[in-house]
């Protein structure tokens, strides 16, 4: 009973917070906005990424189009360290005032401990939950080709808009 009451109380507080901010948000990813993201990556191994996106169009097919750059690092084990530097292009839509979904492609340079340097390419699918006009929590699924993954398959991150 105590656990259920605590869960209901936490859900109620979260609902009040989301409702309060949703009325003020509108569409935070307008043309000219820069979104900077720091993420912790999981599966396989542990890694991290830094990224930046610039919104080029905010009303393209009912969504927004952005270009950016991602720097990803991933350690498969204590002896293996892989990284990539990849420009990316994403298209995103807002489902409501606080939830944004996006998909994109990325390609660039990658380094694999076992296979050396090479061309890296891949796709991504993700979403962001905006707390207010400038901050969001995001979850992203990545796939990067050329022998092994250079990016974490699952990233949980924090985005700030400039």
Image: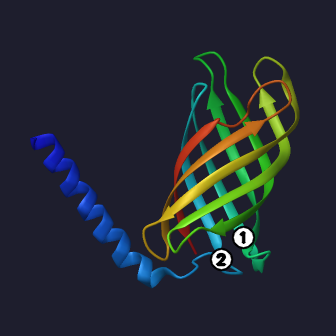
User: In x, y percent, where is residue 73?
Assistant: 65, 37
User: In x, y percent, where is residue 70?
Assistant: 71, 51
Quadrant the N terminus occupies:
top left
Indicate the secondary structure of the residue bearing disc 2. loop
In the shown orientation, is residue 141 left or right of residue 22? right
Q: Quadrant of residue 51?
A: bottom right
Is 152 situated above or below 67? above
Indicate the secondary structure of the residue bearing disc 1. strand
Is 126 situated above or below 129? above
In the image, which disc is placed on residue 132?
A: none
Of residues 106 and 92, the one drawn nearer to the viewer in this rendering: 92
Q: Marks 1 and 2, how far apart in space?
A: 6 Å
Quadrant the C terminus occupies:
bottom right
Disc 1 packing (10 Å; few <14; some 14–19; many ≥20): many
Residue at horizontal 78 percent and vertical 45 percent from the top: 123
Is 118 situated above or below 62? above
Q: How is the image coloured?
A: rainbow
Residue at horizontal 64 percent and vertical 32 percent from the top: 74
If you read the primary sequence from the N terminus, does the residue marked by circle 1 or circle 2 appear first?
A: 2
Q: Are marks 1 and 2 in contact (CB under 8 Å)?
A: yes
Residue that carries the numbered disc 2 in the rendered image: 33
Number of numbered markers: 2
Residue at horizontal 81 percent and vertical 51 percent from the top: 105
In the image, which disc is placed on residue 54?
A: 1
Residue at horizontal 30 percent and vertical 62 percent from the top: 14
User: In x, y percent, where is residue 126?
Assistant: 63, 52
In the shown orientation, is residue 144 left or right of residue 134? right
Q: Quadrant of residue 32?
A: bottom right
In the shown orientation, is residue 4 left or right of residue 39? left
Q: Residue furthest right?
A: 119
């Amino acid at each position: 009973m105590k656990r259920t009451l605590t869960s209901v109380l936490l859900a109620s507080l979260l609902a009040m917070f989301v409702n309060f901010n949703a009325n003020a948000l509108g569409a935070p990813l307008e043309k000219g906005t820069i979104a900077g993201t720091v993420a912790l990556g999981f599966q396989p191994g542990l890694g991290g990424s830094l990224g930046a996106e610039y919104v080029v169009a905010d009303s393209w097919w009912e969504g927004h189009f952005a270009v950016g750059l991602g720097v990803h690092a991933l350690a498969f084990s204590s002896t293996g360290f892989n990284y990539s530097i990849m420009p990316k292009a994403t298209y995103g839509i807002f489902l409501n005032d606080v939830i944004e979904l996006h998909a994109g492609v990325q390609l660039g340079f990658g380094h694999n401990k076992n296979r050396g340097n090479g061309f890296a390419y891949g796709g991504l699918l993700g979403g962001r939950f905006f707390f207010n006009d400038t901050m969001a929590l995001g979850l992203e699924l990545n796939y990067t080709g050329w022998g092994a993954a250079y990016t974490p398959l699952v990233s949980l991150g924090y985005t700030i808009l400039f």
